[in-house]
Image: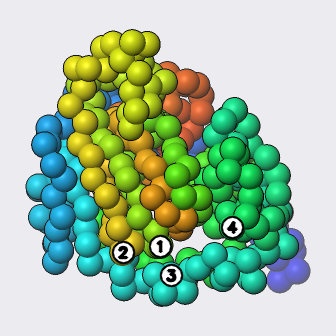
Amino acid sequence: MQTASLTTTLHSLLYLFPIIIGSIFVTFVLILIILISAYFLKRILLKNKRKLIWTPISSIERRSNLSYEEFVKEYASIGKPVIITDIVKNWKASAKWTLDFFREKYGSVKTDGVRDKNNGINISMTIADYMDYLETGDSEQSLYLFDFHMFEYPELYEDCKVPVYCHNLLENFPEKLFNKYGFQQYIYLIIGRKESSVGLHIDSFCTQGWLAGISGRKRLILIPPDQQEFVYDGEVDAFNPDLEKFPLYANVKPVEFILTPGELLYIPSMWWHQAENLENTIALGFNTVNEWNFEMVLHAANEVNPIIGNVLGLLLEFPWLGRVVVASRLL
């Protein structure tokens, strides 16, 4: 009698099992539809936040003991650049990261991150070979180690602590998707030779830029967003403008300054900037997406590719969805 009852129970469970699984699946899909609908509704309601906010400056302020609240109120929320002087100097990297350090520790590493500034082509070479170039290489060349992939060497992160000001929603983006689809890592090592220069540009997709000076001085120029029509899409050399070729640049009011080792520069979204190395330099650069430029970043990404832009937005809005996507190998 008990055996028959147990058999009946098992048959009932086997019958109910696909129904239960189906109900769970349907519930999950409905929740997903609701969340995605809410996401797109939110994007529509926050459309006004795509408006670029910026504040003109005649010189750049240097600040220390700056609280996060002060940074947001006085700089991030109004699109105003600033140099923070008391963060980077406390990193281990400030004393540890030298040219000899990278030669000894990573000399055999081959990187595609060396860019020839004369033609804009990336070339492949070992870190040791690049260090040789810095010391004795052809002065006519202009090679720049612009994006050494730190994520491949996580021990380097132990030497630098990203400050609270640099709150970044990209931290929620699954690392496996970063690596698999070649998204630009938001933290990158920059090593440049004396007198080499990074041309005039704005950071892609309306991201905010940060530049931490580890060693060597950099000369920089910042140009606010409202002067974009005068910079010829970055073709002009801001340090030595050819006004015959680029006459409108005469209307530009650039802000020029020196970034010294131990200083951290904040560059708001859509500010044009150009850097020149006054000495052999080591720096750390990173780009951030946060509440102040999130809508602009998504809008810029959608203009390039609506599918990627919306996927990026969804994964940043719902970090758990990114983990589900990675686990299920949907992307």
Q: Sequence-wise, which precedes: disc 3 or disc 1?
A: 3
Of the numbered discs in the image, which one, if any, rests on residue 215? 1
Residue 176 in the figure: left or right of residue 5:
left
Asked which secondary structure carries label 1, the reply is strand
User: How far is the residue under mark 4 from the one under mark 2?
Assistant: 23 Å
Q: Sequence-wise, which precedes: disc 1 or disc 4?
A: 4
Closer mark to the observer between disc 1 and disc 2: 1
User: What residue is pinned by disc 4?
Assistant: 135
User: How far is the residue under mark 3 from the one under mark 1?
Assistant: 9 Å
Residue at image position (50%, 38%) is 199
Q: Amino acid at mark 1?
A: Ser
x, y percentage for residue 47?
28, 27
Of the numbered discs in the image, which one, if any, rests on residue 262? 2
Asked which secondary structure carries label 4, the reply is helix
Of residues 16 and 4, the one nearer the viewer is: 16
- When the figure is inspected, residue 286 is found, relative to residue 205, above or below; the finding is below
Q: Amino acid at mark 4?
A: Glu
Q: Quadrant of the N terminus?
A: bottom right
Q: Sequence-wise, which precedes: disc 4 or disc 2?
A: 4
User: What residue is pinned by disc 3?
Assistant: 93
Of residues 259 and 308, the one nearer the viewer is: 259
- When the figure is inspected, residue 214 is found, relative to residue 193, above or below; the finding is below
User: How far is the residue under mark 2 from the one under mark 3?
Assistant: 10 Å
Closer mark to the observer between disc 4 and disc 2: 4
